[in-house]
Image (spheres, rainbow, N blue to C red):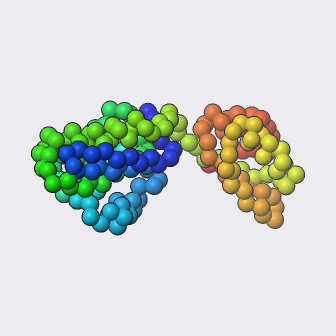
Amino acid sequence: MYTIDKSTQTTIEVKHSKFVTHFVPIAEFAGLQEKLRREHPKSSHVVYALRYLNEYDQIVENSSDDGEPKGSSGVPALNVLRGEELINCAVLIVRYFGGTKLGIGGLIRAYTGATQEIYTISDIIKYEKLHTCEYETTYSDVQRIEYILAQIGIVGADRDFGAAGVGWKIVSTSENIDEFKSRAGRSIKCIV
C-alpha cells in the first residue's frame, strides 16, 4: 500500500471544461470540499474520492459525484486510488463547465484522467503504520534521549516538562520505536 505526505494540485482541460484536482493526505480532507466551493464559486461541481485505514486497520472508502450523473465522477476517481493501492489520502476535483456536455463516458474518462494526472506528479511513498509510544524520563536523560531520537530519525517528539520529570510522546514505525527502546535501554517502557 502507498500514500502521500503532502498536498498536490494540478489542472487539466477536457473539451473546454476545466478540472482542478487536489490530492491531499486524509488528515487535510475534513472541510476541504466546502473550502474549495468557497474558493471556486463559479465551479459546477466539487467531486471527491477517499480511502483510509480506520482504527481496526480496515480500509474505508467513500466518494461523491456532487451533482454529476451517478457513478460518472467519484467512483472513477476512487477506482484510480484503488488501482494504485493508495490509502490515507483523498482526491478532490473542482469542475468548471466549459459549455460542451461530455456525456457519461466522457465524464468517466475526464475524472479518471484528472486523478491519474495528479497521481503521476505526486510524491507517492510506501505506507508504514505509525505507532505511538509514551514514556517518562528524568531531566538528566533529556539530551541523551534527544540524541538517540535524532540518530534513528524520529522527529517531532512531544515533550512535557513536569515537576517529577519529562513526559515524552513519539510517533513512528514499530521498527523505529523498537530500535529506540533498545538504544535507550532501562529507562524506556512505552505506556501506549
Residue 121 at what x, y percent from top left?
43, 38
Q: Is residue 25 left or right of residue 185?
A: left
Q: Is residue 66 visible?
A: no
Position of residue 86 in the picture relative to residue 167 (left or right): left
Residue visible at 75% across and 37% down?
Answer: 151
Numbered circles on residues, count: 0
| Residue at x 14%, y 40% (from the top left corner) | 105
Indicate the position of residue 19 as horizontal and vertical percent values: 29, 49
* Residue 95: % across, % down: 26, 54
Q: Note whether residue 146 is visible.
A: yes
Residue 160 position within the rendered picture, expressed as x and y whole percent measured from the top left: 73, 60
> Where 174 falls versus 24 (above or below)?
above
Residue 56 image-quadrant placement: top left
Residue in the image at 44% along x and 33% along y: 1
Indicate left or right for 147 with 73 as reference. right
Q: 192 and 97: which one is in front?
A: 97
Tell which of 188 and 146 is nearer to you: 146
Q: Nearer the viewer, residue 117 or 78?
A: 117
Identify the residue at horizontal 12%, vertical 50% (top origin): 101
